[in-house]
């Protein structure tokens, strides 16, 4: 077993987001995503088949939800639960430092927070 660090590797600016599956199993996937000044392409909306719990470990970002205004800004430590098929997009991520996300995808529903 090799120990890995969520804050190391892939923290250099790249032409696209870097996504790495850390663990997966029956109806569950855990991903580490590194963004650096990235945003969703114009007109693109994420529409996941599973629930997504996401937390921001470093950097900053802003998400837009199709059914909600205003956009939501995330700072390190912020987390939220996005319901399956709730359309959303990344408005921006910090251009000055890596934005590191930890996302957990799973079948729902869950108990209320």
Image (cartoon, rainbow, N blue to C red):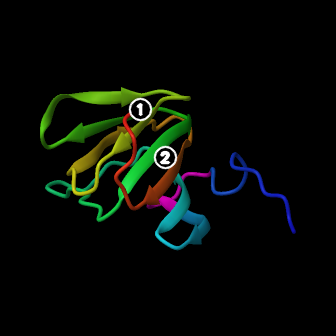
Near-viewer residue (1 or 70)? 1
Instruction: Give percent across and percent down for residue 89.
Output: 26, 48
Measuring from the top left, give residue 64's x and y in whole percent. Answer: 23, 39
Local secondary structure at mark 1:
loop
How crowded is the residue under tag 2: few (<14 C-alpha within 10 Å), some, or many (20+)? many
Q: Residue at x 63, y 50 (%)?
A: 11
Q: Nearer the viewer, residue 73 or 25?
A: 25
Please check the rendered image and state whether residue 17 is part of the magenta-colored stretch, yes or no. yes
Q: Residue lying furthest bottom in this view?
A: 26
Is 70 left or right of 18, judged from the image as shown? Answer: left
Marks 2/1: CA–CA distance? 30 Å
Please tell me whether residue 103 is drawn above or below residue 93 in the rendered image: below
Q: Is residue 49 above or below residue 87?
A: below
Image quadrant assignment for residue 3: bottom right
Give the number of the disc on residue 36: 2
Disc 1 target residue: 113
Q: Is residue 7 left or right of residue 14?
A: right
- Helix, strand or loop for disc 2: loop
| Residue lying at 14% horizontally and 43% vertically, measured from the top left | 66
For the C terminus, the quadrant is: top left
Instruction: In this rendered view, identify the residue nearer to me: 19 or 83.
Output: 83
Q: Which residues are magenta?
A: 12-18
């Amino acid at each position: 077993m090799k120990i890995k660090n969520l804050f190391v590797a892939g923290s250099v600016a790249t032409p696209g987001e870097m996504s790495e599956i850390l663990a997966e199993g029956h109806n569950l996937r855990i991903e580490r995503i590194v963004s650096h000044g990235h945003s969703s392409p114009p007109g693109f909306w994420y529409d996941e088949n599973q629930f997504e719990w996401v937390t921001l470990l470093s950097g900053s970002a802003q998400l837009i939800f199709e059914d909600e205004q205003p956009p939501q800004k995330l700072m390190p430590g912020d987390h939220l639960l996005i319901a399956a098929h709730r359309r959303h997009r990344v408005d921006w991520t910090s251009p000055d430092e890596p934005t590191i996300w930890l996302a957990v995808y799973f079948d729902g529903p869950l108990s209320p927070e």
